[in-house]
Image: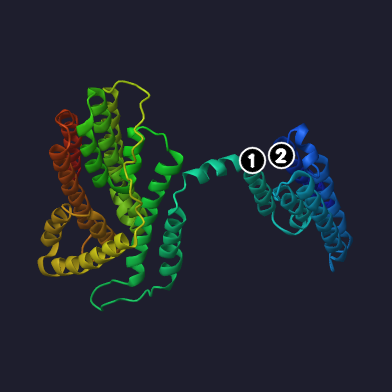
Amino acid sequence: MEDFIDFIPEKFTQFVFVTLLALVIGLAQRRLHTEKEEFKVFGTDRTFTFIGILGFILYIVDENTLIPYLTGWLTLSVLLVVYYIFKLKEQNTYGITTILIGLITYCIPPLVITQPAWLYILIVVTVLIFSEIKGSFVEASKKFDKDEFITLAKFLIIAGVILPIVPDKQIVPFINLTPFNVWIAVVVISAISYMSYLLRKFVFTKSGIIVSGILGGLYSSTATSIILSRKSRNLVNQHENYQYASAIVLSMAMMYFRILFLMIIFNRNLALYLLPVFTIMTVFSLIIGLTTLRKAKKNNSVDKNNIIDKNPLEFKVAIIFTLLYIAFSFITHYVIDIYGVTGLNVLSWITGLVDIHPFLLNIFQYKYDVSTNVIAFATLQAIISNNILKTCYVLFLADKKLRKPVAFGMGAIILLNAALLLFLL
């Protein structure tokens, strides 16, 4: 077989690839344009195939100077310009997508000859996908608010502008704290929150309360629990109460998943150590949430209110997170230095009453003079404390009918988490 493959001339193989790829692009164009619309375009399957073959012939004639190939490109461009001018006059349409695809097809031969297969296949696949999803882009654009691109610009500034320029040097000599480590924590948290927001707004736009709770948990399980608890006061259907209870419990499952993901990024040793615990907690929380959901009547009702209405990417939020992160760096250092492991344990319980992420990312990133086991204890204790706080929020804010299923579900999660904590002793 290898001898047979070696016997096939390389140019023959390249020609076949160019022809097939150009033909695929042409067939895609034919599918996009019905027979009645074919007169509106300069060609479809055969035309695009001939463009690819023409490019191949003119490229291999003189691969050194590329004069024939460039002359062919210029000639094709002039013909397409002439076609476009007549298109404007006769059809009064301004789209140039088909023209651009024709020029890309002409560029396929040098790609096949000079570049690795994965590159030119990726280019063709990209052309095919973007040709087909025009309608999806139109529908998606209708969902964009006026500030969506400003939000995207904020994320690009946070991740692509600020992060590369911040120095990776210690701020103070006695604490392993650098601006780069602080800001990369901001970037990761912002990315998770932003991704959850985008999924909720553009992908699962018509999802029910369950999906909203799951995606909200990726953003903030505390915020999700509070919002769902407040909304439950307006419910009159007992089955909807179980749906809201299930959504709250499932948001806690996503919290365990999110924290495990952060550990994998910032402290793989700790992630491996706690992987069984977080796997058990995530699966158990999912089971509790789905069990609660089974008590709800199956219906097609859709909650059209966003769980997280506010866009998570605000500079003031990033600044607050940064200040908390720096504050916890100093607090954790001095607590461990003065009070040792006991002080860290007490601090972990206290941090559960506020935002635990600055504290957790701090102990994930920095190598304090404590063992992985101690960091694992502090992590689980902070989570238990935060879960207790969320349970109190729900019991205080939610409708009376929601309190019992939520108290059972969240209580079971807290007890199992505590049991696993004791198992690590």
- The secondary structure type at the circle numbered 1 is helix
Image position, residue 286 (x, y; %)? 30, 34
**Amino acid type assigned to the residue bearing label 1 in the image:** Glu
Q: Of label 1 and label 2, which has the lower sequence position? A: 2
Residue 28, numbered label: 2
**Amino acid type assigned to the residue bearing label 2 in the image:** Ala
> Can residue 104 be seen from the camera position used here?
yes
Question: Please, which residue is most extreme toward the bottom here?
Answer: 173
Image position, residue 366 (x, y; %)? 28, 65
Q: Which residue is at the front of the view, 99 or 63? A: 99
Q: Is residue 216 left or right of residue 370?
A: right
Residue 132, numbered label: 1
Proximity of marks 1 and 2: CB atoms separated by less than 8 Å:
yes
Q: Using the image, determine if residue 315 lies above or below residue 38.
A: below
Q: Which residue is at the front of the view, 104 or 330? A: 104
Q: Is residue 96 left or right of residue 425?
A: right
* Residue 388, picture quadrant: top left
Q: Find the distance from the CA under tag 1 to the CA under tag 2.
A: 8 Å
Q: What residue sits 72% from the left and 50% below the top?
A: 101
Q: Quadrant of the N terminus?
A: top right
Image position, residue 78 (x, y; %)? 83, 58
Residue 7, numbered label: none
Q: What residue sits 31% from the left and 38% below the top?
A: 213
Q: Residues within 10 Å of mark 1 (few under 14, many from 20)?
A: some
